[in-house]
Image (cartoon, grey):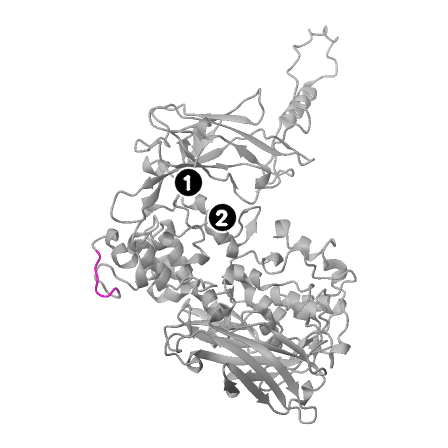
């Protein structure tokens, strides 16, 4: 939307032309000069004020609790100042504010027997006016439905630019003055500004919202809510951060902070799933109160069969990227979530429980929420204990492995590895019964630091004595005189603390083992080749993945893998030929059949013939994958085969630093990859029909994230030195050097740090 500030210049010119057109060329003599006019007031100096903003964060609203009077028995009054940034970056008065909206909520103790102990009450909703109050210079406004409504009056102090006052000039009290308000309760005020344009006259893409101000009206003091048990930082972990706020929330075009969301999504609109419908009567099928709604939508695909209406169509596609029972992934601000126990919040996840009949609740029909704490307030049924919160990380130390020694027979290639282990098992549990997967991956560390996998050592195949396992692997002649690596793909079963026998209810986690490197040319293993994955130039780290996944073990547990470190991932997901190919070489998307039902459509069969970690990570998170249905991360495709928008990825797709480490360059000064990767080996799959050869890494990275598999894209790649799957090289040495970094390295005009940020971002 392009907004412009018009002047009467065009009208003045048109009037002058009209008068001139009527002249006959002889107007007589000029009249006597008129008296000089009264001098005008001096204007503001250039640069001493602004009326535009290039980003929402350019605007700073300063408002003190004592300057807010929105309470019964007193005239409505609010005063505040606004500054913006001039071209020098200085904070100067912002002038010309012409429309805002006020949101006022109150934290109220729940005197009833159902629901959370504290609840948010929106004053505008309580007076049946609406969720917010517009303020304009005229005292009227047009709401989003096109209706003219009463507004508070917004006045700018001409003597003090950037200073504004609000008043109510209509009959009766202002709609935000709620008769039931308690001035001793915490109140929360948030302001939204409208019609803010940038220096080019274009409206800002993001909402302009103030940080919420929590205060006590009776004392004029700032305060802190006891109800905020989920912070905005918890959402930022997956949905990204932009200038201190949540970046990627599609609902309502993003209200940016949890505190802003609860201004509307609170107990005042608490509705059973079956009673929540839109104005046309179409079932929405979810409780719009914040806690039940957020629980329900993040449970998503796991409870799709139980969902109703819009919730089934929209929430049913969401795949939560972490362990849904790890409540602290979202509840990061105190332990109130484990003590504030009420049915609406619990049933949002435990949708199969019927509290009216006792079904799936041991036949128990609670009379109200006040009795829930009797069973769930402490002990085994408390949410903290029942959901084993924190147990995944804590129990990884229940089985620890360390490589003690490695040797190889130079003639036969027989490899002998000794592993020392310590176990923390529950009473009566045999260690072997608690091991889900005893794989330890091993292979050669090539001269360039890349892992080339040889195979798998199974710990339980070894000879055990006092927790020490000796394993002999015959005939590994490729390791003689080489640097070798040993990394765990080792999964165990625990109760959240100790080892337990594997069954159905246990918690599956990775065992603890540091990667081991051994130079088999030296008896003590010294002077091994340093693995590239351990280098400072690696642009990814596990902590970044765990921002969203919480624990990388969770990602692959469906296949009983025990991998939570990249050192394990790259043993299989390697660019080398030792263990390559892809189980998911084709790309599919979600289309519709003749009846309008979702179906999987293979849109790009046989596109990706490698499982390099870079390729698979980009592919999966960008929807360039062989999906099984409309859930998790996927794209839709129309009947012409055109791929649509990305679904399910919670951050901004073009934000490379959502995954890549900040401050680590992807390219070197000469345009090659900083990681040193220069080729990727190909194979259709590990079990047959090989497509042997090698391709270039940069173009593969680009096309595995972008939907770039058309002829124009391939021509661009080839013109800039890429070797593609269509014509792979016979060896890694034959792969040509790409020149992508000439244009796309960081700091260049079309660098990835430029084209993946700003308006394109």
> Do residues under tags 2 and 1 come within 8 Å of each other at their CB atoms?
no
Q: Quadrant of residue 44?
A: top right
The spot of residue 389 in percent (x, y) is: 41, 62
Asked which secondary structure carries label 1, the reply is loop
Please name the residue shown 46% across and 27% down the image: 67
Relative to 265, does residue 405 appear above or below in the rendering?
below
Question: From what the image shows, is residue 742 above or below residue 257?
Answer: below
Q: Which residues are magenta?
A: 361-366
Q: Position of residue 222 (x, y in %)?
A: 45, 34
Q: In what element is the residue under mark 2? A: helix
Which residue lies most toward the bottom here?
Answer: 412
Compared with residue 632, is residue 12 higher up or lower down, i.e. above or below? above
User: How many other residues sit within 10 Å of disc 1, few (<14), some (14-19) or many (≥20)?
Assistant: few
Seen as rendered, the residue at the extreme right is: 670
Residue 204 image position (x, y, % from top left): 57, 42
Mark 2 and mark 1 lie on one chain; the one further toward the N terminus is: 1
| Residue that carries the numbered disc 2 in the rendered image | 253
Disc 2 crowd, CA 10 A, few/some/many (<14, 14-19, 20+): few
Label 1 sits on residue: 145
């Amino acid at each position: 939307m392009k907004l412009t500030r018009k002047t009467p210049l065009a009208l003045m010119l048109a009037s002058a032309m009209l008068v001139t057109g009527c002249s006959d060329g002889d107007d007589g003599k000029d009249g006597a000069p008129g008296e000089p006019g009264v001098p005008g007031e001096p204007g503001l100096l250039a640069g001493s004020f602004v009326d535009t903003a290039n980003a929402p964060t350019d605007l700073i609203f300063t408002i003190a609790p004592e300057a807010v009077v929105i309470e019964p028995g007193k005239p409505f009054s609010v005063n505040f100042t606004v500054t913006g940034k001039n071209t020098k970056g200085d904070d100067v008065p912002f002038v010309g504010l012409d429309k805002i909206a006020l949101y006022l909520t109150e934290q109220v103790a729940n005197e009833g027997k159902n629901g959370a102990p504290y609840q948010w009450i929106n004053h505008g909703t309580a007076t049946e006016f609406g969720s917010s109050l517009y303020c304009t210079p005229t005292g009227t406004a047009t709401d989003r439905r096109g209706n003219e409504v009463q507004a508070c009056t917004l006045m700018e102090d001409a003597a003090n630019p950037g200073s504004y006052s609000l008043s109510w000039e209509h009959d009766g009290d202002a709609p935000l003055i709620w008769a039931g308000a308690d001035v001793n309760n915490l109140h929360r005020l948030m302001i939204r500004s409208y019609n803010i344009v940038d220096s080019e006259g274009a409206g800002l893409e993001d909402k302009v919202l103030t940080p919420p101000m929590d205060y006590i009206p009776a004392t004029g003091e700032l305060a802190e809510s006891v109800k905020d048990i989920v912070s905005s930082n918890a959402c930022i972990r997956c949905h990204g951060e932009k200038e201190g706020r949540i970046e990627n929330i599609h609902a309502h075009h993003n209200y940016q902070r949890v505190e802003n969301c609860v201004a509307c999504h609170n107990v005042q609109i608490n509705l059973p799933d079956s009673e929540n419908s839109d104005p046309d009567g179409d079932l929405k099928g979810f409780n719009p109160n914040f806690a039940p709604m957020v629980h329900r939508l993040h449970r998503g695909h796991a409870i799709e069969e139980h969902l109703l209406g819009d919730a089934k169509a929209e929430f049913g596609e969401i795949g939560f990227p972490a362990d849904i029972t790890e409540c602290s992934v979202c509840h990061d601000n105190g332990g109130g979530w484990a003590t504030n126990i009420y049915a609406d919040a619990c049933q949002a996840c435990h949708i199969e429980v019927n509290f009216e009949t006792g079904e799936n609740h041991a036949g128990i029909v609670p009379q109200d929420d006040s009795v829930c704490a009797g069973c769930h307030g402490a002990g085994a049924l408390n949410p903290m204990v029942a959901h084993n919160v924190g147990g995944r990380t804590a129990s990884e130390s229940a089985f620890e492995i360390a490589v003690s020694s490695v040797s190889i027979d130079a003639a036969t290639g027989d490899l002998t590895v000794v592993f020392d282990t310590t176990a923390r098992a529950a009473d009566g549990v045999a260690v072997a019964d608690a091991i889900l997967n005893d794989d330890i991956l091993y292979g050669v560390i090539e001269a360039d630091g890349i892992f080339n996998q040889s195979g798998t050592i199974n710990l339980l195949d070894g000879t055990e004595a006092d927790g020490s396992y000796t394993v002999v692997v015959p005939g590994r002649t490729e390791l003689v005189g080489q640097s070798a690596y040993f990394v765990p793909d080792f999964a165990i079963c625990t109760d959240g603390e100790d080892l337990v026998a594997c069954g159905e209810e246990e918690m599956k986690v990775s065992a603890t083992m540091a990667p081991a490197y051994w130079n088999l040319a030296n008896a003590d293993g010294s002077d091994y080749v340093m693995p590239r994955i351990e280098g400072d130039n690696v642009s990814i780290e596990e902590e970044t993945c765990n921002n969203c996944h919480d624990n990388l073990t969770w990602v692959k547990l469906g296949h009983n893998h025990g991998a939570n470190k990249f050192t394990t991932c790259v043993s299989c997901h390697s660019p080398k030929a030792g263990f390559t190919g892809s189980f998911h070489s084709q790309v599919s998307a979600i289309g519709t059949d003749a009846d309008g039902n979702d179906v999987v459509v293979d849109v790009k069969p046989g596109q990706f013939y490698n499982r390099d970690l870079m390729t698979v990570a980009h592919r999966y998170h960008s929807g360039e994958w062989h999906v099984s249905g409309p859930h998790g991360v996927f794209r839709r495709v129309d009947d012409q085969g055109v791929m649509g928008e990305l679904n399910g990825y919670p951050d901004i797709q073009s934000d490379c630093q959502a995954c890549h480490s900040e401050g680590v360059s992807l390219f070197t000064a000469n345009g090659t990859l900083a990681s040193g990767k220069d080729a990727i080996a190909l194979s259709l799959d590990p079990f047959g029909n090989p497509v042997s050869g090698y391709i270039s890494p940069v173009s593969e990275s680009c096309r595995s994230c972008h939907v770039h598999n058309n002829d124009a894209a391939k021509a661009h790649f080839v013109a800039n030195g890429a070797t593609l799957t269509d014509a792979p090289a016979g060896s890694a040495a034959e792969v040509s050097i790409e020149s992508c970094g000439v244009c796309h390295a960081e700091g260049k005009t079309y660098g990835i740090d430029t084209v993946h940020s700003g308006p394109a971002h």
